[in-house]
Amino acid sequence: MNSETSIREGIYKWDAVRRFVRWLNATPHPLLAIEISTDRVAGIRFGRTGTHLSFDVEPLPKGAIVPSAIEANIANPSAVKAAVASVCQSLGAKEEDAALLVPDPVIRVFVQHFDEFPRSAEEAIPMLRWKLKKSVPFEVEETLLSYMRQVSLLEDQKPTLLARVSGTSLTTAIVREGVLAGYRCTELPVHTDALTPQLLLEEIYPLAAYYQDTWQEGIQGVRVAGLGGRLPDFVQPLEEEFKCPIRSLLGAAMADGSLRAEARPLAENELDGLVGWMLHRN
C-alpha cells in the first residue's frame, strides 16, 4: 500500500469527510416521489425541510404491471395511467420533477470492484458498459446505465441480510459494515400470499451461501419486508437456518428509533419503497 492510498483511507475514517462524500454522490431529491408496484401506485410529497406533508395510495388491478427487464412492464396502460393521475391529483402534482420508483425486477444491479475508478462519468460509463456487456440479457449499448460509489446503507456493522418480497418477486441483499456485499433479484413461483418459509429459504440461500464462501463468515442479522402480518410464520424457520434474530425491516427501524416519526404512517401501510426513498433522501 503506497502513501497516497494510506492517506486516502485515513481521511475516509473521518465522519465529516464521509458525510461530504455522500453529499457529492447523492442523487437529486425532488419533493415528489411516485412508486409503481405490481398491486398499487403510491406517492409522497415532501416539504422543503425534508419531512413529508402527505401521501396517497391507489390500488391496481391484478396483472396491470408485469415487472421485467426485457419485456413490456405495463400490461394495462389505462389502469396504470388512471392510478398515477389520481395519486398526482391527490398530492397536487403539477409540472415538476418527480422521483420514480419502479419494481426491483425492472432493473439490474451489479456490485463491481475497482482498484481505481474514474472521476468523470465520461470515462466511467464506457468502462462499465464494457464490464457488463456479457452480464445483462439485453444490448448494453442501448441501456440506461447509472452508478454510484458505495456509501453506508445500514448503521449495523455486522453482516445483515435484507429480503424484500413484492408480488412474485424477491430481492435479497447483504450489507456488511454499511457496504453492499451481495444482491440478487429473482422471480418467485407463487405470489406473496402463497409463499412458504421453506420456499423463501430456498430462494435466499444461494446469496447467503455465496457470501459465506466469499467472506468466510455467517449472516448475523436478517431483516424482512413485504410479508406483513405473515412474518411470524417465517421467523422460527429462518432463525433455525441462520442462527440469528429475524426482524421486520420497518418494524426494527420503528423500534430502535432510526425511523423518524413522520415516516411511521408509511411503515404502517407497508410502503417500504417510499420509506427507503425517504431515508435515502435524508
Image (tube, rainbow, N blue to C red):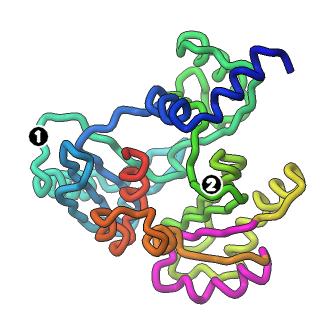
Q: Position of residue 79 (x, y in %)?
A: 25, 58
The picture quadrant where one finds residue 63 is bottom left
Residue at image location 57% in from the left, 88% down from the top:
232
Question: Which is more N-terminal, label 1 or label 2?
Answer: 1
Q: Is residue 233 left or right of residue 115?
A: left
The front one of 236 and 38 is 236
Quadrant in which the N terminus appears: top right
Q: Which mark is residue 3?
A: none
SS category of the residue bearing label 2: strand
Range covered by the magenta-colored residues: 220-242
| 56 relative position to 15: left or right | left
The residue shown at (40%, 63%) is 259
* Quarter residue 117 falls in: top right
Whether residue 167 is visible: no
Measure the alpha-carbon separation of dots 2 and 1: 34 Å
Q: Measured along the vertical axis of the image, is residue 64 above or below residue 92?
A: below
Q: Visible in this render: residue 170?
A: yes
Q: Is residue 224 magenta?
A: yes
Q: Nearer the viewer, residue 229 or 36?
A: 229
Badge number at residue 185: 2
Point out residue 227 in the picture as x, y percentages from the top left corner. 51, 76
Dot 1 surroundings within 10 Å: few (below 14), some, or many (20 or more)? few
Residue 94 is tagged as 1
